[in-house]
Image (spheres, rainbow, N blue to C red):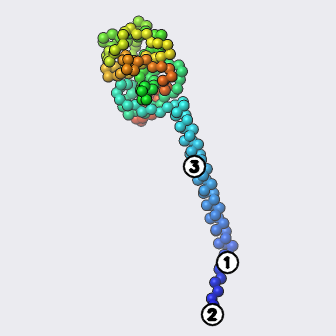
C-alpha cells in the first residue's frame, strides 16, 4: 500500500507566531539599515568639520614644551586673525609644525644673546617660557617680517627650529592650519591651551 504524505496544516496560533517573526525580522533590518546610514552620515560630517574647521592634531617633539608636550592631542580652529602669543599649526615640507606667533607682517623682531625678544624695540613678555635662549638663529637681526607672513618661535627656545632659521623662515598665511585652542589628551591636562 502506498503511503500518502499529508502536510500538516498550521493552525492560527502558529501562523501568528510566524507572522510576528517575519515582521520582527523586517523591523530589525530596517532599524539596522537606518542606524548604518546615520553612522555614515555622522562620520562624514565629523570628517568635514575636523578637516575644514577644527583640525585635530597630535604633538610630536619637544619644541613647544612646557606649553605642549610630545603625544598630546589638540584642536585647532581655522582663523584669519592671528595675534602675538597665539599658538598655531602650519604646513612645512609636508609636515604640520606647531609654534607660537611672535610678531606679524611689518613688525621688527630682535633677539639678544640671552634670548630676550624685542618686537618693534619693546621687550616681549613671555610668561609661558621656562628658559630663554638665542637658539638656532641664522637670520640677520633685527629682522622685519614680510607682508602676508608671521614670525614664529617654539617655547623650548634652545631646541626649536623656527623663524629664527632660514630652514623654516616666516610662515605664509596660506600655510597656516589654524590656532591651537584646546587640549583633549591627556585627560589631566584637558582644557584651553
Give me the C-alpha separation between circle 3 and circle 1. 40 Å
Q: Is residue 177 above or below residue 107?
A: below
Is the residue marked by circle 2 packed among few (<14), some (14-19), or many (20+) residues within 10 Å? Answer: few
Q: Is residue 142 above or below residue 54?
A: above
**Callout 1: SS:** loop
Q: Which part of the image, by quadrant, shows the N terminus?
A: bottom right
**Can residue 123 be seen in the rendering of this structure?**
no
Give me the C-alpha separation between circle 2 and circle 1. 24 Å
Report the residue marked by disc 1: 9
Relative placement, left or right, of 74 versus 44 is: left
**Callout 3: SS:** helix
Between disc 2 and disc 1, whose residue precedes?
2
* Residue found 52% across the figure and 26% down from its top: 78
Q: Which part of the image, by quadrant, shows the C terminus?
A: top left
Q: Is residue 90 above or below residue 109?
A: below
Q: Nearer the viewer, mark 3 or mark 2?
A: 2
**Can residue 185 be seen in the rendering of this structure?**
yes
Relative depth, front residue between 44 and 131: 44
Is the residue marked by circle 1 packed among few (<14), some (14-19), or many (20+) residues within 10 Å? Answer: few
Give me the C-alpha separation between circle 3 and circle 2. 58 Å
Residue 69 pos. (x, y %): 37, 29
Between disc 3 and disc 1, whose residue precedes?
1
Report the residue marked by disc 3: 36
Count of numbered circles in the view? 3
Between disc 3 and disc 2, whose residue precedes?
2
**Residue situated furthest top in the rendering:** 121
**Callout 2: SS:** loop
Location of residue 115 by image quarter: top left
Q: Which mark is residue 1?
A: 2
* Residue found 60% across the figure and 56% down from its top: 29
Q: Nearer the viewer, mark 2 or mark 1?
A: 2
Amino acid at each position: 500500500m502506498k503511503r500518502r504524505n499529508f502536510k500538516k496544516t498550521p493552525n492560527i496560533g502558529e501562523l501568528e507566531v510566524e507572522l510576528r517573526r517575519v515582521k520582527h525580522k523586517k523591523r530589525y533590518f530596517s532599524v539596522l539599515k537606518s542606524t548604518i546610514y546615520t553612522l555614515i552620515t555622522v562620520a562624514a560630517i565629523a570628517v568635514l568639520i575636523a578637516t575644514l574647521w577644527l583640525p585635530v592634531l597630535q604633538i610630536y617633539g619637544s619644541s613647544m614644551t612646557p606649553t605642549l608636550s610630545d603625544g598630546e592631542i589638540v584642536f585647532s580652529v581655522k582663523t584669519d586673525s592671528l595675534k602675538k602669543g597665539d599658538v598655531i599649526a602650519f604646513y612645512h615640507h609636508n609636515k604640520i609644525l606647531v609654534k607660537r606667533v611672535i610678531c606679524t607682517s611689518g613688525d621688527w623682531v630682535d633677539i639678544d644673546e640671552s634670548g630676550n625678544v624685542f618686537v618693534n624695540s619693546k621687550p616681549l613678555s613671555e610668561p609661558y617660557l621656562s628658559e630663554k635662549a638665542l637658539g638656532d638663529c641664522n637670520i640677520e637681526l633685527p629682522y622685519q617680517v614680510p607682508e602676508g607672513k608671521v614670525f614664529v618661535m617654539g617655547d623650548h627656545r634652545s631646541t626649536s627650529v623656527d623663524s629664527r632659521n632660514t630652514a623654516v623662515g616666516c610662515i605664509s598665511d596660506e600655510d597656516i592650519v589654524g590656532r591651537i585652542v584646546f587640549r583633549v589628551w591627556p585627560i589631566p591636562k584637558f582644557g584651553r591651551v
